[in-house]
Image: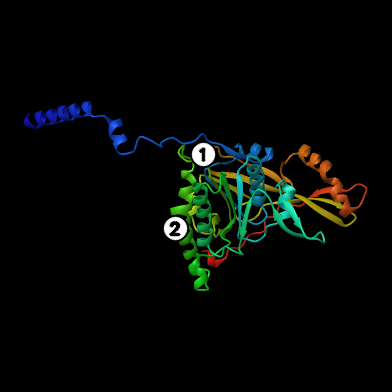
Amino acid sequence: MARKASKSLSAAVSAEIKSKFDLNKFKSSKGLDKNVKFKEQKWIPLSPAFQEIAGVPGVPMGHISLLRGHSDTGKTTALLEAAVSAQKMGILPVFIITEMKWNWEHAAQMGLEVKLIKDDEDNVIDYEGNFIYVDRETLHTIEDVAAFSMDLQKEQKKGNLPYDLAFFWDSIGSIPCAMSVEKLKNNNEWNAGAMSTQFGNTVNQSIVMSRKESSPYTNTLICINKVWTAKAESPMGQPKMMNKGGMAMWYDATFVVTFGNVSNAGTSKIKAIKGGKQVEWGKRTNLQIDKNHVNGMQSRGKIVMTNHGFIQDTDKDKNNYKKEHSDEWTKILGGGTFKIVEDQEDVTPVLYDVQDL
């Protein structure tokens, strides 16, 4: 009975204290009453074809998005569609190109506004526009990429770079860490560790914090992530697609799009053919939303990638594209009619590299 009475008295005292306690006043005294609101979610739109298959407008602003898959499956097409839209929205695209497969002509073909700088003999000597571009000429390690990203965000906070920023990195897995460079050994554990410490602990946190109402700008990070295929762990098991550079970016990403198949590209070429000549004008690829912590929508389907962006995998869309661009193909194939043919799906296994295990 005494124990029960003690508990009742304790509860009564606690209730009395709570009734007189002002939580809002306490939070105010600790500076915890502000900066709790996030901005309304906005998106950098991709093509209608992507939106139809993915069920989302594009890539989310203020988040980390990964575009992953085997070679030539649609990752760069998605990245360029997002960059073109960002530029049109007044967001400053920041291209971080460490794989060194960049093509300015293709970027312009996709719709990026690029000004050609020419010399007196009309030779193109440089490119200018409303964007920032860096590559392996100045960025040699994972640490360099992280430092560059943080430096731009610091300049933004100082008022020296008055833009929302959209970082486009092509690609994770294409550049080693400082220790790998120093030791002349491309060690995947060291590289994964550098991705975790340099991005997981700094860059990624800075990106998502820009979603807060207290941040005057909203920054976005969109990365192409190279992949490799891990063998099945058992005779009845299935191979797995694994991200190069470790799993830090997968864990921090809120939006992940996978292109192609798990163990191979899984694409099929679409060509215009005439008299032994051919023009490959499209590729059918698989698209899947593997992770979406923004609105939960997940979907999958087939889509066709072209030099001008994605189109839907329908006869109507393919015929419309043919009408719009057939004049370009006649420069290679000659005049007259030509056939449109599609190769069988490429299911050649992508062999993994033991260095990636």
Tell me how many marks there are: 2
**Could you tell me residue 108's position as x and y percent?**
73, 50
Q: Horizontally, is 333 left or right of 248 in the view?
A: right
| Circle on res. 259 | none
Residue 232 can be seen in this image: no
The amino acid at mark 1 is: Val
Q: Residue at x 84, y 49 (%)?
A: 328
Q: Does residue 317 show up?
A: yes
In this picture, residue 29 sits left or right of residue 13: right
Looking at the image, is mark 2 or mark 1 nearer the viewer? 2
**Residue 347 lies in what quarter of the image?**
bottom right
**Disc 2: which residue:** 197
| Up-down relation of residue 172 to residue 298 (above or below) | below
Q: Pinpoint residue 199: horizontal percent, then vertical percent.
A: 48, 55
N-term-proximal mark, 2 vs 1: 2
Which quadrant of the figure contains the N terminus? top left
Q: Secondary structure at mark 2?
A: helix
Residue 29 falls in image quadrant: top left
Question: Dot 2, how many residues are within 10 Å of its Cα: few (below 14), some (14-19), or many (20+)?
Answer: some
Q: Nearer the viewer, residue 74 or 135?
A: 135
Residue identified by numbered label 1: 294
Q: Residue furthest right?
A: 336
* Amino acid tagged 2: Thr
Using a 10 Å C-alpha cutoff, classify the residue at mark 1 as few (fewer than 14 neighbours), some (14 to 19) or many (20 or more).
few
**Image side of residue 137 versus residue 234, left or right:** right
Residue 104 point in image, percent of width and height? 71, 55
Spatial CA distance of label 2 from label 1 is 24 Å
Q: How is the image coloured?
A: rainbow
Query: Looking at this view, is 339 or 170 the one in front?
Result: 170
Residue 213 percent across, percent down from the top left: 47, 37
Please, is residue 229 above or below residue 37 in the view? below
Q: Say left or right for 246 vs 27.
A: right
